[in-house]
């Protein structure tokens, strides 16, 4: 799967003004890159313009979006794998968010959170344990336990379902993958709403995160697009509504090989 960009310098050069407030691009400069999890792209157009582009979304949003696209293309196994990875990366996001919120700015700058993460970055169960502890501390309910015990179409729990697909090579039915998609979406979206209600500034954390990824790049651009899972909506929307918005837009951005 690829993503398409346009060189911002070429856009400026190719603008033709028709009348006040209206213009057209005489020629477009399209650059394609393979999608990567770090969401940072170094582009070089045919005219030699260099630019660093950051996509302003979190890892869990990107992975969930890819799962939605796979499901739309009737590839349920690939979709489930992306949804399963999305929830794991949401645990990571939650951990960094809460620790950045609660630790001093000095400790954050000294890299203590990143040092901690290095110790558990390859150990999913330890990440999950830390997430459960922080979730209980900040959110204060047992919805995570209910979430893990949720059954797919009345059969296996989501944990069993995920393990069967990821580790045992099971190919899930489309309807089971759709149910799994909805369960994952609801838990993440509900948790983000609870964070908002607790006064946790998700938007500020997200902004600091992409600034860190940009580093000291000379020519830099940050772009956004409507993801299925919104970071800080005023109210939770149904997955059907969010998928419609995402899928209507995404074909302009992504291009399959």
Image (cartoon, rainbow, N blue to C red):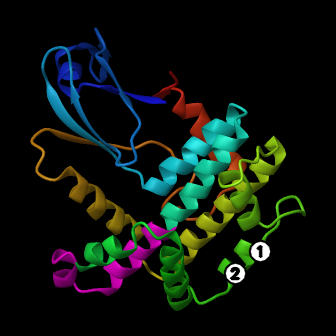
The residue drawn where x is 53% and y is 33% is: 250
Query: Which residue is labeled 2 in the image?
Result: 145
Q: In x, y percent, where is residue 249? A: 54, 33
Q: Residues within 10 Å of mark 1 (few under 14, many from 20)?
A: some
The residue drawn where x is 77% and y is 74% is: 149
Q: Nearer the viewer, residue 130 or 57?
A: 130
Residue 76 position by quadrant: top right
Instruction: Measure how far apart labels 2 and 1 are at the Cα level.
Output: 6 Å
Q: Nearer the viewer, residue 106 or 201?
A: 106
Q: Which residue extends farthest top? A: 26
Asked if residue 225 lies in the magenta stretch, the reply is no
Q: Main secondary structure of the magenta part?
A: helix
Residue 237 position by quadrant: bottom right
The residue drawn where x is 66% and y is 55% is: 167
Q: Is residue 239 left or right of residue 108?
A: right
Q: Residues within 10 Å of mark 2 (few under 14, many from 20)?
A: few
The residue drawn where x is 23% and y is 29% is: 43
Q: Is residue 219 visible?
A: yes
Q: In x, y percent, where is residue 242? A: 63, 48
Q: Nearer the viewer, residue 162 or 40?
A: 162
In magenta, the rendered stretch is 91-111
Q: In x, y percent, where is residue 25? A: 30, 14
Above or below, 103 relative to 214: below
Query: Which residue is labeled 1 in the image?
Result: 149
Above or below, 93 relative to 177: below
Q: Nearer the viewer, residue 10 or 96?
A: 96
Asked if residue 109 lies in the magenta stretch, the reply is yes
Q: In x, y percent, where is residue 177? A: 75, 48
Q: Is residue 232 visible?
A: no
Q: Which mark is residue 88?
A: none
């Amino acid at each position: 799967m690829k993503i398409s960009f346009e060189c911002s310098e070429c856009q400026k050069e190719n603008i033709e003004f028709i009348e006040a407030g209206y213009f057209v691009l005489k020629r477009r400069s399209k650059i394609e890159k393979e999608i990567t999890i770090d969401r940072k792209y170094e582009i070089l157009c045919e005219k030699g313009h260099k630019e660093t582009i950051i996509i302003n979304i979190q890892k869990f949003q990107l992975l969930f979006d890819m799962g939605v696209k796979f499901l739309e293309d009737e590839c349920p196994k690939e979709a489930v794998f992306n949804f399963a990875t999305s929830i794991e990366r949401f645990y990571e996001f939650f951990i960094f968010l809460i620790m950045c919120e609660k630790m001093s700015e000095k400790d954050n700058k000294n890299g203590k959170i990143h040092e901690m993460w290095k110790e558990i970055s390859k150990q999913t169960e330890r990440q999950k344990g830390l997430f459960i502890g922080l979730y209980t501390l900040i959110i204060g309910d047992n919805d995570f336990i209910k979430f893990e015990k949720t059954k797919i179409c009345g059969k296996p729990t989501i944990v069993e379902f995920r393990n069967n697909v990821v580790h045992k090579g099971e190919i899930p039915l489309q309807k089971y993958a759709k149910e799994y998609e909805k369960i994952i979406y609801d838990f993440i979206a509900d948790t983000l709403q609870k964070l908002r209600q607790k006064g946790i500034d998700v938007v500020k954390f997200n902004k600091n995160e992409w600034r860190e990824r940009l580093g000291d790049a000379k020519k830099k651009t940050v772009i956004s697009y409507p993801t299925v899972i919104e970071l800080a909506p005023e109210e939770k929307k149904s997955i059907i509504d969010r998928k419609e918005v995402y899928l209507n837009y995404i074909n302009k951005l992504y291009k399959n090989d």
